[in-house]
Amino acid sequence: MVLNQNLRSIDYQPDCCLQSYGSLINENGVFKLQDAVGIFCLVSVAAALEFKYHHAEELEAYLKGVHDAYSSFTHLHSIGRSVEGRDLWVLVLGRFPTHHKIGIPEFKYVANMHGDETVGREILLHLIDFLVTSYGHDPVITRLLNNTRIHIMPTMNPDGFEATKVPDCYYTRGRYNKNGEDLNRNFPDAFEKNNASIQPETQAVMNWIKNETFVLSANLHGGALVASYTFDNGNSVTISSKGYSRSPDDDVFIHLAKTYSSNHASMYKGTGCDNRQSFPEGITNGYSWYQLEGGMQDYNYVWGQCFEITLELSCCKYPPADQLEKFWRDNKVALIEYIKQVHLGVKGQVMDRNGNPIPNAIVEAKGRPHVCPYRTNEHGEYFLLLLPGTYVINATVPGYKSILKTVEITDNTSNFSALKQDFSFSEVSIRSRAASCPKTPLYQQLGRASAAVKPTLHILVLMTVMLAIFK
């Protein structure tokens, strides 16, 4: 992975901002200065962002100020509330910030799900600053925002952050939410039954994932320096003799983790935080590092059709504020390069004979079956993250013959568009019924089958799961 030196050198300090700045940009990201009548220079809301810790009221005020200043390409909303009633704010950036647009993939960053791990919370605010002040100035950022819908949640656990009265590098009670629950152990688990009571913050994120077509994501943590990837948990189906829990898309996850680590100022060195801990190339399989039940990244991958990795960004969980500027500079390039990976692979629509979209059609790459099959959204859309190479894509509408298409995928991340491949079912003229995978330990079924029959029968078990979905 080549370091993007151009992005690293960029440090925009706009001379002024324009009132209703966003309204001066057309849908192609070009300024319409001929329409700028009676506009005067203001101090940019984003430019005023300090390198300090922003508590709940300050964070909310900043996000609202950004949205007010850049209303044409941002959208601010709360996806729910914490136990103590604090809003879980998400700022959306893109050419169509208020709604999904066919062909444009959805990306998200989530930080501060452990309330005492604070670096991610602040660098996401500075990422927002960088994106809004660069849009219309820098061609890379402009194209990125024009072709990607980016969701940024600076804090998933605002109660835990506010409860951390004395910053500590290692551990405080602020890690947990107000009910004392670890939010990164609180999601349904694909390998074993998670008996934890689903918390309001967790449920809000689960609903958010269900309501959007997220393709790629990362959650930002602290306490180590490494990019960790799926699976965090495992069983006999996924765990190798070397203690590695492998997903069907392991090659893609390794690429994603390396993309971030290699563009980070030092993560790629793999030295970790002490002599006992090292991570070659700055990455690790989650299970190989330590087993985790009920984690958010596995939930995203299995039930959300979204590839998520975990980014550990600081050896100290809650470092002094005077170190925040360095953390931002260390991560700036990596944050941007990682977003670009949402354009890997292939995308398209599945249509019926009348040209209507077919939702809930199953679309998978041959040899990469997901335990919860990946399916099309309400627009008949699918997105599959795949590395460059030749693949057979299988589109299936239950009750009809599958369609197979061979595709040659190249790296289109610099062009901000995955390969487009549509499918048309000439015999189908009805909409597929709604379908969803049960929030049960789906890999337990494969594990039981593995203990009783040959591994080649795992596909039969997957078919059984698929039939249960459409039953």
Image: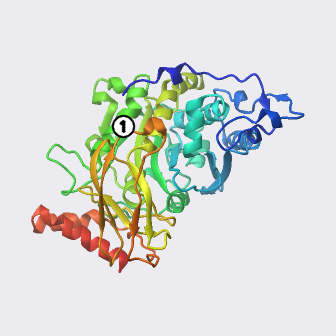
**Which residue corresponds to the image point at 50% horizontal and 49% vertical from the top-left?**
176
Relative to residue 2, is residue 75 depicted above or below? below
Q: Which residue is mark 1?
A: 257
**Which residue corresponds to the image point at 55% horizontal and 22% vertical from the top-left?**
323
Name the one closer to the observer, 223 or 449. Answer: 449
Q: Position of residue 211 (x, y in %)?
A: 54, 62
**Drawn side of residue 148 relative to residue 252, left or right:** right
Q: Position of residue 144 (x, y in %)?
A: 55, 38
Q: Is residue 166 visible?
A: no
Q: Is residue 28 visible?
A: yes
Total labels drawn: 1
Q: Position of residue 76 (x, y in %)?
A: 68, 49
Q: Position of residue 168 (x, y in %)?
A: 51, 32
Can you tell which quarter of the image residue 267 is in? top left
Task: Check the picture and name the quadrant holding the N terminus.
Answer: top left
**Drawn side of residue 71 relative to residue 443, left or right:** right
**Which residue corresponds to the image point at 40% horizontal and 76% vertical from the top-left?**
428
